[in-house]
Amino acid sequence: MSASTAWPRTERTPDIDRPSARTRTARGLRWLPFVVVAVEIAVVGAGAVPLGSGLVVVVAVELLLGVVVLAEIAVVVRTFRAARANGRGRAAALEDAMRGVLPPLPARLVIMEARTFSSLARWPLRRRIAPEAAVTASYGRQLRPLLLALLPVSILELVVVELVVPWTAVRIVLLVASAYFCLWLLGLVASMWVRPHWVADGRLALNCMTFASLHVPLERVVGVRAVRVSGMPRSVEVDGDVLTVSVMGAANVELELEVPVAITGDRPCDARRVRFYADRPQDVIRAIEAAG
């Protein structure tokens, strides 16, 4: 926690942020299955070719799609095994694998949904995602009542749909969507308990329900204090060298680092100050001071 040691800054090389040709190719291939399906629909579904030729196109496209899917499965397995070999948990390793084969937005949506329903399954079992020796900190005291207040409204919506909508197919679709939303909402509530902030092994983990998970190294901490920050436009905000993980736009703990350090996780960045919200800020402050 002392600032007496002078840590040299490491200059960033000019090309460190420039993706290589191999990286650009890999990113492009993530979109290939979507492009293949779109081409198949456009060519065959729109009647752009005769039926006989269309069947040939369908077979060729399906074969290409099968090759792409097999290649992506191989990438998933390889990435998963490499992540496990590096000490990542099963869930974290699977998330790494999804990022390797899907474009950024679809990968993020898939990971968020998986975290939501994983939290829903873990909640009754009281299984938190944190090291056994970690000091955990909740952050959902303000938001949890608001989310739970939406649950009766969603259940009422199920009843209204069943009584009012006369078309069977439309009613089934709306009932499934409403039931899914109820489970998704419960998963978000569960994630506040299942995915807490935690301090262990010289790092601070900051979670924003299922939307983001970030890790902050604590070896260069020079100060931590209670603050009052409000009005943040996003739950995870990076402004210069300041990272803020807020709840309903508010943060109440600020961590100051000696130099900007690499924050890893869903929203990687370099930050010198880290602000976040905790239900009991003094407990987190003591845990960080003890870890530093």
Image: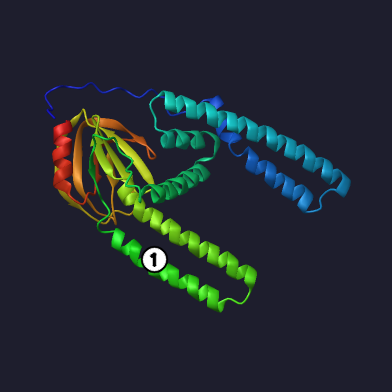
**How crowded is the residue under tag 1: few (<14 C-alpha within 10 Å), some, or many (20+)?**
some
Where residue 238 sits, quadrant-wise, is: top left
Disc 1 element = helix
Is residue 155 depicted above or below 20 in this figure? below
Going by the image, does 27 lie left or right of 88? right
Taking the spot 46% from the left edge, 37% from the top edge, the residue there is: 95
Is residue 213 depicted above or below 180 in this figure? above
Q: How many numbered callouts?
A: 1
Q: Nearer the viewer, residue 267 or 171?
A: 171
Taking the spot 50% from the left edge, 28% from the top edge, the residue there is: 79
Residue 12: x and y in percent read: 35, 24
Render colour scheme: rainbow
Q: Nearer the viewer, residue 126 or 289?
A: 126
Going by the numbered disc 1, the residue's amino acid type is: Leu
Q: Quadrant of the C terminus?
A: top left
Residue 41: x and y in percent read: 73, 49
**Residue that badge 1 annotates:** 151
Going by the image, does 34 lie left or right of 218? right
Taking the spot 29% from the left edge, 63% from the top edge, the residue there is: 145
Going by the image, does 287 lie left or right of 179? left
Residue 96 makes an appearance in the image: yes
Q: Nearer the viewer, residue 211 or 90?
A: 90
Is residue 137 depicted above or below 232 in this figure? above
Where residue 84 sits, quadrant-wise, is: top left
Taking the spot 69% from the left edge, 45% from the top edge, the residue there is: 37
Residue 16 makes an appearance in the image: no
Is residue 198 depicted above or below 259 in this figure? below
Residue 25: x and y in percent read: 58, 30
Q: Nearer the viewer, residue 101 or 240?
A: 101
Residue 172: x and y in percent read: 59, 67
Q: Quadrant of the N terminus?
A: top left
